Image (spheres, rainbow, N blue to C red):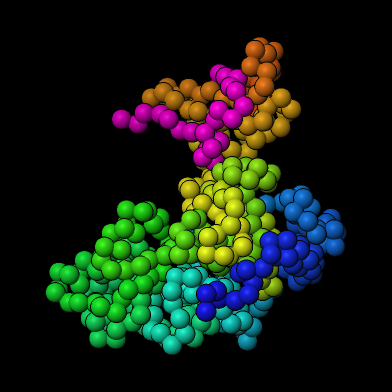
């Protein structure tokens, strides 16, 4: 069996049609059963949200707003989830988890609730195997995310959790699991401890890692130890977003989410290939997050995966989108840079670069435009910078396409020595 299911090889247009057909129903469901979305989308006709263009008109819900609504609701004696969950405590909800912040997330009763079986299959795990799960089983959902996915795949799980490295090595040596699931750094620690103890782990030949950056250097180190490790990108809010395949060319998007890449600080989709913030709409009816801003940067890769999977791919995690920076005692946000750009049709893109030494901040807004010699435009943009940020800064007109494609809207290049 090459693929987890037939969804992975659908014609792209068939997948897109299915996602857009499911979108209006999800919006309607969220409005009807999640009080937060009843408020946020009160003026939205759910039936009309049947395209990516229509979806892009809805507000982006970022973690800060999710947290604020949860706090406000709890303070008022209301729903602990801030009105975003359609579930209540009891038979429909198996567990509640906490993410740093603290943001609380529900876990429903549906099999493979977090949709992790797909990435496990792509990493080489198969039904009937034992998996050594080293994600945490308390507070955060990572341990449960992986365990429920493994069960859906037909695997047995050893709940190793984190820490107790020597005991982890002993358990692996005695139980002979087919592979490891956890952070890449902890797998490295386990393998090094096993070598130090003189204990062979011949069965551990594959791994699914997440929760941290997984650079090629670490992947190659694991390969040299005989472990074929693959990564996935998932969050406690929406579950699986994308996963690595044997092609090792980016991460294929999961079948249960609609992914947009937007310019940081805005909800505006960027052209394909440009780096921006990942915004996720999940089709999960229990926790129907619509246009949830992950705060992570990535970009869509062109073409299809060489393995035959036809879903879109992203480059993987490329940093954080929240580049809020304090300049001369004032916070400047990516949304403010976006507001400046929107005032000028001649400007397509901008990057605020902060330089200088501590207590001597200097800032310059570099704007891409086709009218490089327009001194009037430069003066008007400078006025807008002062109006929006309440700070003075230089303006540089630069050629179209000259700014780096790295998702940075604000670059802090100050010296802190």
Compared across the picture, whether 34 is left or right of 391 comes to: right
Please identify the dominant SS of the magenta region. loop
Count the marks.
0
Compared across the picture, whether 324 is left or right of 56 comes to: left
Q: What is the quadrant of residue 220 in the picture?
A: bottom left
Question: Residue at the spot x=55%, y=54% of the render?
Answer: 314
Position in image of residue 293 (x %, y %) = 61, 53
Question: Residue at the spot x=43%, y=30% of the render?
Answer: 413
Question: Residue at the spot x=61%, y=81% of the render?
Answer: 110
Position in image of residue 79 (x %, y %) = 65, 70
Q: What is the quadrant of residue 388 in the picture?
A: top right
Q: Quadrant of the C terminus?
A: top left
| Magenta extent | 390-417
- Towards the viewer: 27 or 241: 241
Q: What is the quadrant of residue 171 in the picture?
A: bottom left
- Towards the viewer: 98 or 266: 266
Task: Reply yes or no: does residue 405 show up in magenta.
Answer: yes
Whether residue 323 is visible here, answered yes or no, is yes
- Towards the viewer: 224 or 99: 224
Task: Tell me: residue 77, above or below residue 298.
Answer: below
Position in image of residue 61 (x %, y %) = 65, 54
Question: Residue at the spot x=73%, y=50% of the render?
Answer: 56
Whether residue 294 is visible here, answered yes or no, is no
Task: Tell me: residue 386, above or below residue 250.
Answer: above
Task: Tell me: residue 360, above or below residue 320.
Answer: above
Position in image of residue 215 (x %, y %) = 37, 53
């Amino acid at each position: 069996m090459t693929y987890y299911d037939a969804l992975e090889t659908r014609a792209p247009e068939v997948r897109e049609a299915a996602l857009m057909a499911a979108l209006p129903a999800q919006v309607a469901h969220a409005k009807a059963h999640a009080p937060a979305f009843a408020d946020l989308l009160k003026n939205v006709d759910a039936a009309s949200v049947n395209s990516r263009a229509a979806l892009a008109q809805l507000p982006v819900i970022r973690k800060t707003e999710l947290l604020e609504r949860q706090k406000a609701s709890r303070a008022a004696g209301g729903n602990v989830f801030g009105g975003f969950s359609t579930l209540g405590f009891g038979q429909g909800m198996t567990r509640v988890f906490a993410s740093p912040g603290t943001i609380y997330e529900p876990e429903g009763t549906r099999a493979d609730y977090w949709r992790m079986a797909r990435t496990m299959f792509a990493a080489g795990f198969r039904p009937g195997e034992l998996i050594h799960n080293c994600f945490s089983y308390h507070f955060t959902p990572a341990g449960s995310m992986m365990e429920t996915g493994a069960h859906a795949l037909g695997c047995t799980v050893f709940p190793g959790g984190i820490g107790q490295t020597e005991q982890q090595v002993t358990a692996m040596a005695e139980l002979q699991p087919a592979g490891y699931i956890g952070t890449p750094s902890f797998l490295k620690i386990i393998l090094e401890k096993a070598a130090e103890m003189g204990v062979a782990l011949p069965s551990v030949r594959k791994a699914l890692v997440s929760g941290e950056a997984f650079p090629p250097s670490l992947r190659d180190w694991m390969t040299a130890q005989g472990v074929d490790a693959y990564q996935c990108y998932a969050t406690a809010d929406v579950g699986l977003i994308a996963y690595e395949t044997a092609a090792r060319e980016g991460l294929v998007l999961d079948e249960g989410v609609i992914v947009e890449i937007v310019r940081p600080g805005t909800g505006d989709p960027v052209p394909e290939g440009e780096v921006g913030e990942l915004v996720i709409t999940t089709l999960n009816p229990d926790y129907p997050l619509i246009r949830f801003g992950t705060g992570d940067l990535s970009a869509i890769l062109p073409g299809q995966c060489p393995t035959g999977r036809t879903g879109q791919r992203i480059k993987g995690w490329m940093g954080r989108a929240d580049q809020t920076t304090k300049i001369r005692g004032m916070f400047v946000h990516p949304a403010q840079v976006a507001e400046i750009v929107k005032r000028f049709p001649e400007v397509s893109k901008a990057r605020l670069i902060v330089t200088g030494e501590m207590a001597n901040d200097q800032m310059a807004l570099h704007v891409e435009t086709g009218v490089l010699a327009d001194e009037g435009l430069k003066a008007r943009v400078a006025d807008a910078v002062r109006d929006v940020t309440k700070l003075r800064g230089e303006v540089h007109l630069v050629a179209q396409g000259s700014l780096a494609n790295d998702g940075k809207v604000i670059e802090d290049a100050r010296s802190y020595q």
